[in-house]
């Protein structure tokens, strides 16, 4: 399993050989947060977009001088990494107003590290979708594009945008194929492995990633499927779920994770970008219309429907709805999801967690009890 | 057979306010007529809200930051959810609803939202015909109201807002308001009457101009204004903007302050006003007597707070719908709390610095509501700036504005004791 090993390796670190090689060629790397940032715009400028993460961050002592214990540990970990200069390899940081914690991280960095990153940018994303707002967002993306062009002295043409969209659409299609393999009775890979594959893609040039995905799909065709599991689980909830070890804890107990509704997961790739005459408009439309996170206000019902649909498609026995503590967006959504799952008789386990894998004992106990409940 | 009346929190608040008004008139009628004025206005408002369903008037639940003027112009009763939950907290009735909500949502959701969720789950609040909120100030609001609407199948509208305040903000919000008007027309089956809106806007502007004039008087030393009012008036403005009652209130209130200031009188006698506090965020809704204790114990008058820091301008051009919506859009993006909590942190910093300077304060208090994660994220930056640039100390309190169980009044008092001891001893 050469491709899987390589992708798993990449996922476990912040920087990988492909990023190093990219930098050695004198090319730029820009970190972004969250999935509402259209990476294609950066890719079209021959800039490598890397999604911000803080793998293996266990303490946030320096970050906690600024952020409080009431802020989500994902954001605190990212600030910790900035203060420890672990993002020094990045030439820019792009944020969206996706949640209160993210936007304040952007605010803090502007104040305390204003010159560390040549590009420090926040894209204002509408909280709902209609034709007006799509058009507005298209203009916002145009401004972002101009800012990238100006900061790095590059030109982003329509042709390069189209090419980027093609490459990214191929990624989306390959990831969909990968997820389709998990629908069967004996999926060829675990949830932890699948998460590694996705996470790796956030820090690789997508053309290289696509090659690895193709290779992976071929290798998985040869692999014997997994049959020794107790239940098929789906994982839903907060972003900041980029740690395969977290899923591994559940899988070690016999709960095989077969799908998810994560932005580090199926919500990232499930819809292609349909290219029209204006590539920026195509991006605006696609990004606003993709299966949403609860920052979007008009889709509370659809988000629960999405989970239900996934449960059916992947033959799921139970849903683990996890949130990083203090994540209001997913916390509020719980009210609706729980009701819907109950009405559809879908067992659900609701968990508040931290970004780093801390209280494993407690997680184990709860998952164990959940699996017993499902088995009965 | 006597059938038990269905519990209704609007009635509960109404009964309490009626009782409190009588008590205030009796005990403070002469010394503080203004307190009774505020309560009397609230009694009328809740009475109307309570009776709306019976009279067949459509009801909207709205958030602070949604212009009530549009609703008054369309004969829709705007029940301001934050004012309702705040009132429930102030009479000690929020806690049970918070507990109920916490069975269904995480405890870190704002108690303001949990109170409403709990009341709805208990069936103790009649559901509205529509729920309207702005996209600011916070995730907790944004995460709960659309979910409540979906849960109970209530029509819902969010006035989207931009992160940065630029020349693009007002047209953006105005376009959102236009969509809201269309939806309200659909729900009520009635067209917006432009003449009626103009009339409502005239009231709104009259009150607004008095607020701005009064604001100048309020800065006097000694402060002519009691701490309690400084907090309560905010709710009043965001609830009653566009009504003649609010104009009447501010006319009387302005005259009162003017008279006091001209005689050099303050809420506390000049020699007793030792400290001037600016609350750069809210204040404990569950126990406002803390403010009186500060006056008594330390001569510390709470001269201003973030919430009733109205600095935006009235809507200038009332000639047509577009210009009115544009003016309202400009106004709502600059409303207190929307402004401080919703956009970049500098909004909060600038507003706080400005308040401290204008009101000649010597200390700032951050009533750090545990649910306001965006404020907690930058309080260190704010505190440092206030210290470095204005030489002002800030007391940072970790508390819940609605729920005394996070930090009780006694706990807060102890922190004030310590603060005064460290910064103002001798
Ligand atoms: S986990 Fe929630 S609170 Fe944390 S960054 Fe993501 S959306 Fe924001
Ligand atoms: S008090 Fe803070 S957290 Fe609560 S609704 Fe208001 S801004 Fe949001």
Image (cartoon, coloured by chain):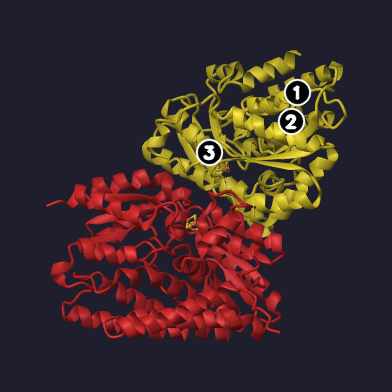
> Which one is nearer the viewer's eye here, A26 or B43?
B43
Residue B167, can we see it? yes
Residue at 84 percent across and 42 percent down: it is A312
Residue indicated by mark 3: A94
Callout 1: residue from which chain? A
Residue drawn 40% across and 79% down? B38
The secondary element bearing badge 2 is classed as: helix
In the picture of the structure, the residue carrying the numbered disc 1 is A213
Farthest right residue in view: A185
Callout 3: SS: strand
Residue A168 has which mark?
Answer: none
Q: Which comes sooner in the sequence, label 2 or label 3?
A: 3
Q: Chain of mark 2?
A: A
Please tell me how crowded label 2 is: few (under 14), some (14-19), or many (20+) other residues with Cα within 10 Å.
many
Q: Residue furthest front?
A: B1
Rendered colour, chain B: red
Q: Colour of chain A?
A: yellow
Question: Which residue was labeled with disc 2?
Answer: A171
Q: Pinpoint residue B174: horizontal percent, then vertical percent.
A: 56, 67
Q: For the residues tagged 1 and 2, is the chain the same?
A: yes
Mark positioned earlier in the residue sequence (1 or 3):
3
Disc 1 with disc 3 on a shared chain: yes
Measured in 3D between alpha carbons, the distance from the residue under mark 1 to the one under mark 3, in whole angstroms, is: 26 Å
- The residue nearer to you, when weighing A319 against A374, is A374
- Mark 1 Cα-neighbour bin, 10 Å: few <14, some 14–19, many ≥20: many
Q: Residue A114, percent across and down?
A: 39, 37
Determine whether, in the image, residue B405 is placed left or right of residue B190.
Answer: left
């Amino acid at each position: 399993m050469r491709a899987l090993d390589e992708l798993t390796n990449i996922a476990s670190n912040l920087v990988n050989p492909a990023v190093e090689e990219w930098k050695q060629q004198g090319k730029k790397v820009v970190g972004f947060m969250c999935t509402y940032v259209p990476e294609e715009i950066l890719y079209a400028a021959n800039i490598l977009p890397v999604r911000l993460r803080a793998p293996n961050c266990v303490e946030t002592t320096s970050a906690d001088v600024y952020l409080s214990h009431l802020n989500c540990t994902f954001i605190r970990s990212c600030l910790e990494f900035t203060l420890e200069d672990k993002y020094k390899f990045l030439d820019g940081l792009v944020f969206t107003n996706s949640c209160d914690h993210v936007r304040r991280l952007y605010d803090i960095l502007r104040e305390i590290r204003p010159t560390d990153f040549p590009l420090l940018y926040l894209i204002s994303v509408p909280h709902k979708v209609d034709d007006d707002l799509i058009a507005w967002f298209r203009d916002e993306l145009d401004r972002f594009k101009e800012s990238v062009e100006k900061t790095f002295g590059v030109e982003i043409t329509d042709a390069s945008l189209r090419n980027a969209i093609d490459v990214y659409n191929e990624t989306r299609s390959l990831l969909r194929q990968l997820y389709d393999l998990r629908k069967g009775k004996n999926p060829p890979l675990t949830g932890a492995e699948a998460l590694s594959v996705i996470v790796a893609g956030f820090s690789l040039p997508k053309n290289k990633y696509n090659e690895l995905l193709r290779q992976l799909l071929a290798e998985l065709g040869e692999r014997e499927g997994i049959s020794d599991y107790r239940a098929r689980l789906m994982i839903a909830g907060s972003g900041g779920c980029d740690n395969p070890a977290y899923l591994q804890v559940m899988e070690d107990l016999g709960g095989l994770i077969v799908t998810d509704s994560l932005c580090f997961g199926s919500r990232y790739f499930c819809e292609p970008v349909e290219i029209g005459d204006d590539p920026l408009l195509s991006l605006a439309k696609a990004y606003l219309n993709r299966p949403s996170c609860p920052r979007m206000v008009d889709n509370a019902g659809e988000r629960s429907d999405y989970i239900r649909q996934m449960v059916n498609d992947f033959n799921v026995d139970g849903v683990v709805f996890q949130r990083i503590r203090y994540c209001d967006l997913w916390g509020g959504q719980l009210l609706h999801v729980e009701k819907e799952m109950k009405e559809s008789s879908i067992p659900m386990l609701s968990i508040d967690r931290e970004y780093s894998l801390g209280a494993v004992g407690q997680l184990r106990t709860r998952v164990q009890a959940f699996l017993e409940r499902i088995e009965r | 057979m006597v059938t038990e009346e269905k519990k209704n929190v609007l009635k509960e608040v109404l009964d309490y306010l009626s009782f409190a008004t009588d008590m205030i008139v009796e005990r403070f009628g002469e010394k503080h007529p203004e307190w009774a004025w505020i309560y009397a206005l609230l009694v009328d408002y809740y009475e109307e809200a309570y009776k709306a369903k019976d009279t067949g008037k459509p009801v909207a639940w709205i958030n602070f930051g949604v212009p009530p003027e549009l609703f008054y112009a369309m004969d829709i009763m705007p029940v301001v959810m934050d004012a309702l939950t705040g009132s429930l907290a102030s009479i000690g009735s929020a806690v049970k609803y918070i507990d109920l909500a916490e069975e269904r949502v995480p405890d870190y959701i704002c108690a303001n939202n949990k109170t409403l969720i709990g009341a709805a789950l208990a069936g103790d609040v009649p559901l509205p015909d529509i729920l309207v909120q702005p996209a600011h100030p916070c995730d907790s609001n944004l995460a709960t109201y659309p979910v409540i609407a979906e849960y109970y199948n209530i029509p819902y509208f969010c006035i989207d807002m931009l992160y940065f305040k630029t020349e693009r903000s007002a047209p953006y919000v105005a376009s959102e308001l236009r969509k809201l008007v269309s939806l309200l027309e659909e729900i009520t089956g009635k067209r917006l009457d432009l003449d009626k809106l103009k009339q409502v806007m005239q009231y709104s502007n009259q009150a607004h101009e008095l607020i701005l004039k009064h604001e100048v008087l309020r800065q006097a030393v000694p402060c002519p204004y009691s701490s309690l009012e400084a907090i309560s008036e905010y709710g009043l403005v965001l609830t009653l903007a566009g009504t003649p009652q609010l104009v009447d209130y501010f006319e009387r209130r302005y005259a009162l302050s003017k008279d006091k200031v001209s005689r050099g009188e303050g809420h506390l006698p000049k020699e007793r006003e030792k400290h001037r506090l600016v609350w750069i965020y809210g204040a404990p809704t569950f126990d406002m007597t803390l403010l009186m204790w500060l006056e008594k114990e330390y001569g510390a008058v709470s001269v201003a707070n973030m919430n009733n820091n109205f600095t935006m301008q009235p809507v200038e051009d009332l000639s047509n719908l577009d210009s009115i919506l544009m003016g309202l859009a400009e106004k709502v993006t600059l409303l207190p709390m929307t402004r401080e909590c919703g956009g970049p942190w500098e909004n909060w910093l600038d507003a706080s610095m400005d308040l401290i300077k204008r009101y000649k304060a010597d200390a700032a208090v951050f009533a750090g509501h545990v649910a306001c994660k965006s404020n907690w994220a930058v309080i260190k930056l704010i505190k440092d700036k206030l210290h470095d640039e204005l030489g002002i100390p800030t007391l940072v309190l970790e508390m819940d504005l609605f729920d005394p169980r996070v930090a009780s009044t006694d706990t807060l008092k102890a922190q004030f004791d310590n603060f005064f001891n460290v910064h103002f001893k001798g």
